[in-house]
Image (cartoon, helix red, strand yellow):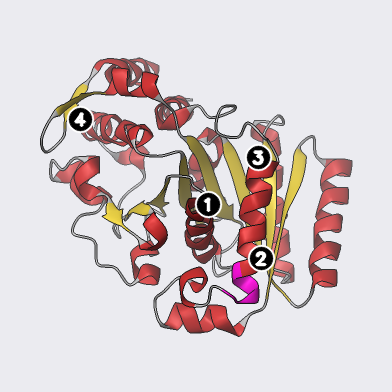
Amino acid sequence: MMDQANKLRQIIDNLKVKEPEKEVDVKATHKLKSAKVITVTSGKGGVGKTNITINLAIALSEMGKRVTVMDADLGLGNIDVLLGVVPKYTLVDVIYNNKNIVEVLSDGPGNIKFVAGGSGIEDLAKLDNYQIQKFLANIALLDKISDIILIDTGAGLSDSVMNFVMAADEVILVTTPEPTSITDAYAIIKAVSKRDSNKTVKLIINRAENATEANNITNKFSMVTQKFLEIKLQPLGFILQDNMVIKAVKAQQPFSISFPKSMASKQIKDISKRLLDINENFINEGRTGIKSFVSRFVNILSG
């Protein structure tokens, strides 16, 4: 397996991939710029993770960042459903139908771009060598068009989810005040801590009744994490219960577009500002690009 990983890294470094109109040297492209790769995950499903990912992307785009969302829920990807957009191609077409990642990109609201996952994609570890080569070489092209790549994972502690979490530059964890959600979110933090205690987990509380409840949960997470785990937890903020969010979901539109003056829209903007303000040099530091993400991902698969 290690020989395969080394071979794949060489492919990523040297392979030239054809775009619809021109040939792109992946190695040369990477030298020009790298994107910040952020995984957004949750301990359990149904906490609003994908909805937050989409609206966070739009908020970051409004702040002048070029944002691409990648649907990495390899079983039940639904970004396209929430956006009310029917993509012409998905990641399935990159792997099986000889499509380029540039062809697969779809335009989303607020000037964001997204890559639909396509239901039924198996874990990358189960693909054959040729399929992995093609997939990895293609997604490396996303560095060319993105400042930030948000990867929306599935929920839970599956190997697939944790591989995406551990390979990313940064991790955003979404939870709600429900006890089961809190317990599962802590399990994610614990799993990350065991694998890499130097990685920082950024926390968002969703659907809190009020600011007091959200702050109490955040404080408890911080205290327990500090006491029992060797990992840094960084609160990003919270989004309170907002009926406008429910209305937007039913209309298959991002709430920040449908209801820009809603409480949830204001709070997602605050979160996006905090995400960028954590490091004044966000765009220049700590961004290793999708290519390095892929390299780390391959290392994890081969480990």
Task: Say what amino acid the circle numbered 2 marks.
Answer: Gln
Label drawn at residue 130: 4
Q: Are marks 4 and 3 in contact (CB under 8 Å)?
A: no
Which residue is at the front of the view, 229 or 206? Answer: 206
Instruction: State the extent of the magenta-drawn residues as a range.
Output: 261-265
In the rendered view, tell whether residue 192 sits above or below residue 242. above
Q: Helix or strand or loop: what does disc 2 sit on?
A: helix
Q: CA distance from mark 2 to mark 1?
A: 13 Å
Q: Helix or strand or loop: what does disc 4 sit on?
A: helix
In the rendered view, tell whether residue 254 sits above or below residue 234. below
Residue 69 screen position, x and y as percent: 41, 51
Q: Are marks 1 and 4 in contact (CB under 8 Å)?
A: no
Please count the marks in the image: 4
Task: Say what amino acid the circle numbered 1 marks.
Answer: Leu
Task: Say what amino acid the circle numbered 4 marks.
Answer: Tyr
Q: Residues within 10 Å of mark 3 (few under 14, many from 20)?
A: many
- Going from the N terminus, do you reach mark 4 or mark 2 first? 4
Residue under pointer 2: 267
> Which residue appears at 65% of the width and 51% of the height?
273
- Going from the N terminus, do you reach mark 1 or mark 4 first? 1
Q: Nearer the viewer, mark 2 or mark 3?
A: 2
Q: CA distance from mark 1 to mark 3?
A: 26 Å
- Going from the N terminus, do you reach mark 4 or mark 3 first? 4
- Going from the N terminus, do you reach mark 2 or mark 3 first? 3
Residue under pointer 3: 192
